[in-house]
Amino acid sequence: MLELGRGTLSLYDTGSAVGLFWASSAEGLPYYERGAPLRAILHWWALGHGWHMVHAGAVGTASGGVLLVGQAGSGKSTAALACVESGLSYVGDNDVLVDGRLEPFVHGLYCSAKLEPEHRRRAVPRLDARLGTTERWSHGKELFFLDGALGRSVSVGFPLKAVVVPRITAGERATIQPMSAAAGLLRLAPSTLFQLPGARRHRFQQMVQLLQRVPAYALELGRDLGTVTPAIRTILAAE
């Protein structure tokens, strides 16, 4: 398997499970490789183990959590970071691994996060100064890492209890409501299928099966991001 990037090349041999990554220069490494290194190789490796990488975030506790899905700008990162230091652990905001073979389980890949500075200050106002160095990402977002001051809030994974579709609204408080499996799939599948190469039919079937096994909810974020965690806890308590 092969993927060409801007000055990079990713190769993966399924027979030996060996991956190779080449970059034309360390200084010119694309911003997305710094925030999510070896993404294509990890995606191919996961397919061979019954897992699949999805374009989603995830927060929860050791006993269970939720998958935050949607296209860029839907509020995934805002919702995930609003839960940091609130008793819910952070697994990711953009790319995570899902194992749906037995009990659905979500695994973390990266401790990075991408968010517009204004939204970051709203999501983690008390901790914004402790996040350390940030760097420009794209579309006005900045890249930062949570393995330093916020390391205790980062989890390697947990059982998956629900799929949650966030949406930024003008309301005051975060609210939730049930969503059909078809509507949840419509938010999860497109960005996942077109951002990662290969095996689209197989990956789509995996996502269909996931939405048949766990419920979907709509989450309206509202202006008060402090109400996001209680809303997600309500979902977890019901499952």
Image (cartoon, helix red, strand yellow):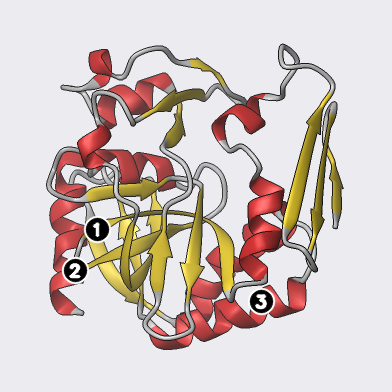
- Answer whether residue 178 is visible to the viewer in this image: yes
- Say whether marks 1 and 2 touch (CB < 8 Å): yes
Front position in the image: 197 or 50? 50
Q: Quadrant of residue 104?
A: bottom left
What percent of the width, then of the height, locates residue 207? 56, 76
Instruction: Tell me the distance, in whole angstroms, between the alpha carbons under discs 3 and 2.
Output: 27 Å
Q: Residue at x 49, y 24 (%)?
A: 143
Front position in the image: 78 or 55? 55
Residue 60 shows which numbered tag?
A: 1
Instruction: Tell me the distance, in whole angstroms, between the alpha carbons under discs 1 and 2.
Output: 8 Å
- The quarter of the image holding the C terminus is bottom left
Q: Residue at x 52, y 25 (%)?
A: 141
What percent of the width, then of the height, locates residue 175? 22, 59
Q: Mark 3 or mark 2, which has the lower sequence index?
A: 2
Task: Residue lying at the far front in this picture: please name it.
Answer: 16
Instruction: Tell me the distance, in whole angstroms, between the alpha carbons under discs 3 and 1.
Output: 25 Å
Q: Nearer the viewer, mark 3 or mark 2?
A: 2
According to the picture, the residue beneath numbered tag 3 turns out to be 204
Q: Amino acid at mark 3?
A: Phe
Mark 1 closeness class: few <14, some 14–19, many ≥20 residues within 10 Å: many
What percent of the width, then of the height, locates residue 70? 51, 56
189 with respect to 209 (left or right): right
Kindly state the secondary structure of the residue where label 3 is placed: helix
According to the picture, the residue beneath numbered tag 2 turns out to be 63
Q: Mark 3 or mark 1, which has the lower sequence index?
A: 1
Front position in the image: 155 or 55? 155
- Answer whether residue 75 is visible to the viewer in this image: no
Q: Residue at x 74, y 50 (%)?
A: 19
177 with respect to 145 (left or right): left
Relative vertical location of residue 133 with respect to residue 66 in this rendering, above or below: above
Mark 2 closeness class: few <14, some 14–19, many ≥20 residues within 10 Å: few
- The quarter of the image holding the N terminus is bottom right
